[in-house]
Image (cartoon, rainbow, N blue to C red):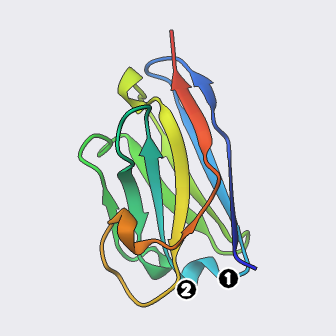
Amino acid sequence: QVQLVESGGGVVQPGGSLRLSCSASGFILDEAVMGWFRQAPGVERESVACMSKEGFIKVYGDGVKGRFTISGDSALNTMYLQLNNVNFGDTAIYYCAADLGGGWKGCDKRTFGQWGQGTQVTVSS
């Protein structure tokens, strides 16, 4: 049974840092295309960062480039999203997702079939 469980969300001050985790089970992380997406109230879910199988390709949304880093730990079968220098615009529910079928298709949420339940990140002073 495929399962994705996010953790690490919380309240952080502007300019602060946070690390989100996505624990995967039922499949091997390195054999899937993985991604992080976020959704703020009243806004369409947007891509934050995605990586190809084994992390050879990594792409980031324009709003997070240079601040966020996506990575994976094969031994723990866990994906991470490091958030640095956060701002109010980063407030959202963050979801991890997996595309288990085929190769790299970019960071389009429509290609991801497996989703976690989400973790809330709130940037507040």
Quarter of the picture containing the N terminus is: bottom right
The furthest residue to the front: 42
Element type at mark 1: loop
Picture coordinates of residue 107, whole percent (x, y): 33, 66
Residue annotated with mark 2: 31
Element type at mark 2: helix
Picture coordinates of residue 58, whole percent (x, y): 36, 66
The residue located at (46%, 63%) in the rendering is 35
The residue located at (47%, 88%) in the rendering is 101
Picture coordinates of residue 83, whole percent (x, y): 48, 39
The image quadrant of residue 26 is bottom right
Position above or below: 48 against 121: below
Residue annotated with mark 1: 27
The residue lying toward the viewer, choosing from 33 and 14, is 33
Amino acid marked by disc 2:
Glu
The furthest residue to the bottom: 102
Nearer the camera: disc 2 or disc 1: 1
Q: Residues within 10 Å of mark 2 (few under 14, many from 20)?
A: some
Say which mark, if any, is on residue 69. Answer: none
Callout 2 touching callout 1 (CB < 8 Å): yes
Position above or below: 70 against 9: below
